[in-house]
Amino acid sequence: MDKNIKTEQGLRGTVKRKIYYTARLQVLRDAIASGKYSRETLEALEKWASKPIFVENILFVILRKLFKVEVKIPFITGMYSLEAVRHNAITVSGLEKAMTQLSGLTTAPVTAIAIGTGTPGANALGTEVTTDGGQRGVATITQTTVSTTDDSIEYEKTFNFTGGPHAITEEGLFDNNTSGGNMFASQSFASSSLGNGDSLVITHTVTASQA
């Protein structure tokens, strides 16, 4: 379920995660690009290409915070799905970044997505992945409409893993495409083990709304 939060500054966002078998993902994308297949066929291919992902609930979050462990019990602490969508957290530096973009005082736009195996801090991921296809990189950026014209920006990146496994638990948007920089927004979530032959597709959306 899409659970957006809104800051006083009128920024909110969501992060969607999907895991695929890399080879099957390419088959799916080729089928979509061809325009030859029905919606039902594409939906079947989507399921065939996807791997289940654990979507945590509030009980999972509480147990992890209190006891530093992940308790994955379907229908008790969450559920397995082919897609996870949760709200993000706009950082303090992210709000500052939004203001400097408006004023023209920065020439470093937010363009990159990074993932990690820790917990996000104030301006960086806890343990950013830098190898095996999980390293930070430029996202595909699209300006979209949610409530008013062009009020939303969608960042999407596919991480194709060639090694591992890596227990991915965090994601963030950055204004540096390789390392460091300012983290605009982030999210933490239940771990997903990703290794050779797996693909993680992150779609991070940031929307401006009238307060």
Image: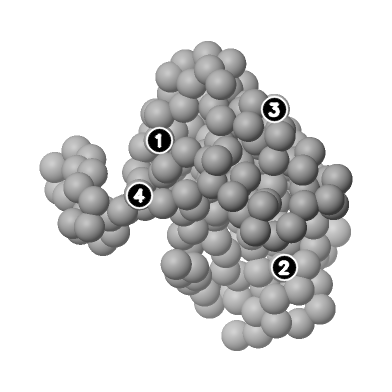
The quadrant of the picture occupied by the C terminus is bottom right
Residue visible at 47% across and 16% down in the picture:
164
Residue sitting nearer the eye, 129 or 44: 44
Residue under label 4, please give it: 80
Q: Secondary structure at mark 4?
A: strand
* Mark 4–mark 2 CB contact (< 8 Å): no
Disc 2 vs disc 3: which is toward the camera?
2
| Label 2 element class | strand
Rounded to the nearest angstrom, the CA distance separating label 4 from label 2 is 28 Å
**Which numbered disc flags the more N-terminal residue, 2 or 3?**
2
Residue at 23%, 51% in the rendered image: 74
Q: Residues within 10 Å of mark 4 (few under 14, many from 20)?
A: some
- Residue type at numbered disc 3: Thr
- Image spot of residue 63 (x, y percent): 17, 50
Horizontally, residue 98 falls left or right of residue 20, namely: right
Instruction: Name the residue at 67% across, 51% down.
Output: 42
Q: Which amino acid lies under the numbered mark 4 shown in the image of this protein? A: Tyr
**Residue at image mark 2:** 152
In the picture, the disc for residue 104 is none
Q: Which residue is more in the foreground, 193 or 68?
A: 193
**Which residue bears the numbered disc 1?**
192
Image-quadrant location for residue 162: top right
Horizontal side of residue 71 vs 196, given as left or right:
left
Mark 1 nearby-residue class (10 Å; few <14, some 14–19, many ≥20): some
Labelled disc at residue 178: 3
Q: How far apart in space, not on screen, are marks 2 and 1 (Cα)?
A: 27 Å
